[in-house]
Amino acid sequence: MVFEKYADQLYRCNRCRQCRYVTGKPLALIDPATGAPRENAVMPSCPSGFLNKFAAYYASGKLMVAKRILEGLHQIDRKTAEIFYTCSLCGACDYQCSLNLADSESPNKLEFRPSEIFEEIREDLADLGFGPMPNHIKFAESIRQNHNPYNESHKDRLVWAEGRNSKLPSNGNVIYFVGCTTAYRNPAIAKATVNIFERAGIEYGVLQSKGYSNEWCCGSPLLRTGQRKLAEEIMRHNVKAIEESGADTLVTSCAGCYATIKRDYAKVFKDLSFEVVHSSEFIQRLIRNGKLKPKQVDKKVTYHDPCHLGRHMGLYDAPREVLKAIPGIQFVEMPRTRKNAWCCGGGGGMMSGFPEMASKTADVRIQEAMDIGANAIVSTCPFCEVNLTKAAEIFHRDVSIMDLAELLV
Ligand code: SF4
Ligand code: SF4
């Protein structure tokens, strides 16, 4: 029976619909005007439901649709599949769900995770021939041929390092996993990150073979869109390359690479021989042990929690500690922050599959940042940065969007 393996999960949802909103659990929302906690504040949590304005797009609706498919009351078709793909897998519904009684910021404390069910359902939809979406098939083909989803030549993966005074090292205790989005769409992040390593005297390397990058896409775009088989092929390449380098630490700039390698690779390969660290954690360690002294930056900034770093991995404090250590920074929080953060809208295959919705979701976030008077949105994910920057261009928003590492050079 289709979807039978989800039966236990699907019947748990009681359709209370609490997952649609960020509510006071405990009251975490502040009044942007006064900075004071709001009484009984309720704000949307789910970009998919909020922007599509139809019950089926919320987690509660998707679970109901899946249940009807399981019971044979609804036949899967392309439109139904599209509903499951119109979701950034942001995980906001996981934390707002009334079935999760522990009020925790840790993904390990969640007893019921609708977003994980939706990700698994995508694999089934792909097996049944109803998924993924056309643009997801195109980027998978590019990953197969070029090792990146952007249809860029693999030979250009290290173009960001051209013009350096010294050769980019290929070995060290620390391997810097640059990621496709940083390498091809946001090279300033890669340049800033290696600048930080070099100023702090870190022995680092970037995976290379025969003069070219030996790093392939981490596989996150494939896993999120139900294309696991190819994802596991490329995972094997990356793990082999990292382990052969002998490094004990892998640093990623991208929240998606971080969650994928630390969580999803570990599920497939059990014991990884290296520690996976996000650049914000690495920078936090460098500042704590005195190896990096942040320079003065006079800006009023807010921090956007990438879903893959915050809700999915429970990493909220390191970026904030780094921001607060930068002299001159005025740091302000948005009303929806940490586990309650509004997703940028780019993840889960949304930016390629449903670009208009990805941009509209990002614009909601930009408005939230502008409402508290921030003139820069800082994030720790090149993918969030690309999606927010694109939305700022489309909707003519006067706000700068940058990565944490860029504030430290
Ligand atoms: S994962 Fe995010 S976008 Fe998808 S249903 Fe849950 S809250 Fe909505
Ligand atoms: S997913 Fe959780 S919060 Fe949402 S309707 Fe079901 S039980 Fe309620």
Image (tube, rainbow, N blue to C red):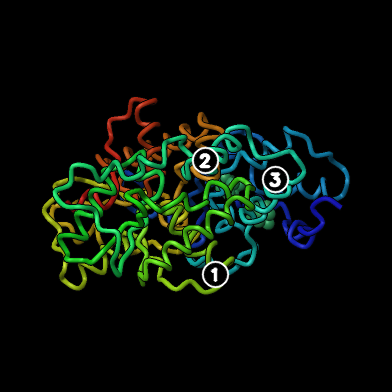
Q: Amino acid at mark 1?
A: Asn
Helix, strand or loop at label 1? It is: helix
Pointer 1 residue: 108
Q: Nearer the viewer, residue 311 or 273?
A: 273
Pointer 2 residue: 145
- Pointer 2 local density, CA inside 10 Å: few below 14, some 14–19, many at least 20: some
Q: Amino acid at mark 2?
A: Gln
Helix, strand or loop at label 2? It is: helix
Quadrant of residue 80 within the rendered picture: top right
* Disc 1 from disc 2: Cα separation: 36 Å
Q: Residue 252: horizontal and vertical position, in percent?
A: 37, 57
Q: Cβ(mark 3) to ligand 1 < 8 Å? A: yes
Q: Amino acid at mark 3?
A: Lys
Tell me the tag on residue 62.
3
Tell me the tag on residue 187.
none
Furthest toward the front, the residue is 210
* Callout 1–callout 3 Cβ contact below 8 Å: no
In this rendering, position of residue 247 left or right of residue 161: right
* Disc 3 from disc 2: Cα separation: 34 Å
Closer to the chain start, of discs 1 and 2, is 1
- Choose mark 1 or mark 2, whichever is in front: 2
Can residue 349 be seen here? The reply is: yes
User: Residue drawn at (36%, 43%), measured in percent from left and top?
Assistant: 157
Q: Residue 57: horizontal and vertical position, in percent?
A: 65, 40
Q: Nearer the viewer, residue 8 or 234?
A: 234
Tally the marks.
Answer: 3
- Choose mark 3 or mark 2, whichever is in front: 2
